[in-house]
Image (cartoon, grey):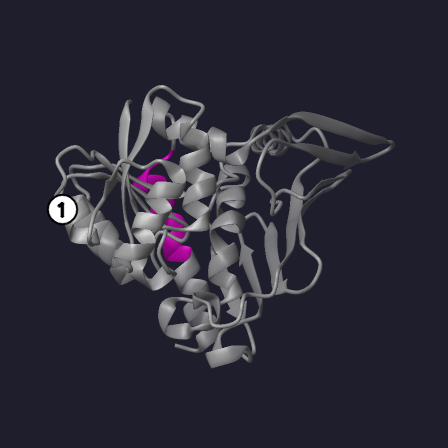
Amino acid sequence: MPLEIGLIGATGIAERTMLAPSLQRLDVTVRAVAASDPVRAKEYATKHAIPVVHQDYSSLLADPSIDTVHISLHNSAHHRWVVRAAVAGKTVIVEKPLCLTADELAEITFAAEDVEVFEAVATAGHEWQRTVREFIADERYGALESVATRTTFAVPAAGGYRDRRELGGGVFFDNASYWLQALQSTVGLDVVASSGSSDFDGPDGVDRSFSASLRWATGVQATLVCDVGPDHRSEHLFTFERATVKLRNFLRPVVGAVPLNLVITAEDRQVLSFPASSYYDRQLAAIADGTADGLTVAAPRIRLMAEIYQDARGN
């Protein structure tokens, strides 16, 4: 579907997820931008040749030439502006996480009855997920026993929202959508138990390290260990009865096309290589082409994320 996009947030992630990919498509135009600081919005628009600058988010939502809104604000602002954009009749693309609590999700679901809402999880839909799903379904390596995910992200910039609890900061919210989407696409999310833990010893009581686990009725267990540090790391390890399947660098802090390899270790070692592709180009293409997963698919992830986080907080 042709998209006339307005940006709520003059951000670096909008440059990567919307502006750069839109240059590759004739059916997508970034037409307007608004920011908390109108001067910054004007500078951003000049830099990126965006024709319209709105003085605030509300005036952008009232713009009849905009049919789609991209939201890239701090995490705690997602819910409010997704609801307002949906009420305004706009298609919504919001950076992960879609929102932070089950109550927020319920309000979004009610507001978005007649519009589409997409949680931007850049790693979704990659071919490796279909391949692993097939391994699980046909049991060529025996039954799946466990999935272990390990990530390390860069230490947040001082003063940013990631180190402010009231703005939805913390490493788990940065990681949860990637982790849960991968599991949803391969194993499914019909879990029977979940848990989370953290010392919450980062600035302002946020989590700079977090551990989470899930269990299915079949006995399969999935774990996440995520933290911040000097060296970027992202890997999934699927353990089957007769093989392990490892995916390293499933999320890289780079822009552009990157290759991915599944390393299968059974009686011998096999590498399945996938052609280099750009996460952000594929994500925007799926939304524009009408093949992206919407709110119905994102909702179980958010409910489970909120449940795990509340368990770690002890409430």
Look at 55% across and 80% down and name the residue there: 201
Residue 183 or 21: which is nearer the viewer? 21
In the image, residue 114 sits, relative to residue 289, either above or below, namely below
Q: Is residue 190 visible?
A: no
Residue 305 screen position, x and y as percent: 43, 58
Tag 1: amino acid: Val
Tag 1, which secondary structure?
A: helix
Q: Is residue 264 above or below residue 78?
A: above
**Residue position marked by numbered label 1 in the rendering:** 87
Q: Can residue 2 be seen in the rendering of this structure?
A: yes
Q: Write the residue at 37% across / 34% down.
A: 293
Q: Position of residue 124 (x, y in %)?
A: 49, 37
Task: Please report the residue visible at 20 percent of the width from the left and 37 percent of the height from the top.
Answer: 115
Crowding near the residue tagged with mark 1, few <14, some 14–19, many ≥20 C-alpha atoms within 10 Å: some
Tell which of 288 and 291 is nearer to you.
Answer: 288
Q: Nearer the viewer, residue 290 or 138?
A: 290
Q: Quadrant of residue 26?
A: top left
Q: Nearer the viewer, residue 114 or 1?
A: 1
Task: Characterize the magenta stretch by its predominant secondary structure.
Answer: helix
Q: Is residue 294 magenta?
A: yes
* Magenta stretch contains residue 5: no
Q: Which residues are magenta?
A: 293-304
Which quarter of the figure has residue 275?
A: top right
Q: Find the residue positioned furthest to the right.
A: 268
Residue drawn at 71 percent across, 58 percent down: 231
Q: How far from the left and from the top, in percent, is residue 175? A: 52, 56
Q: Quadrant of the N terminus?
A: top left
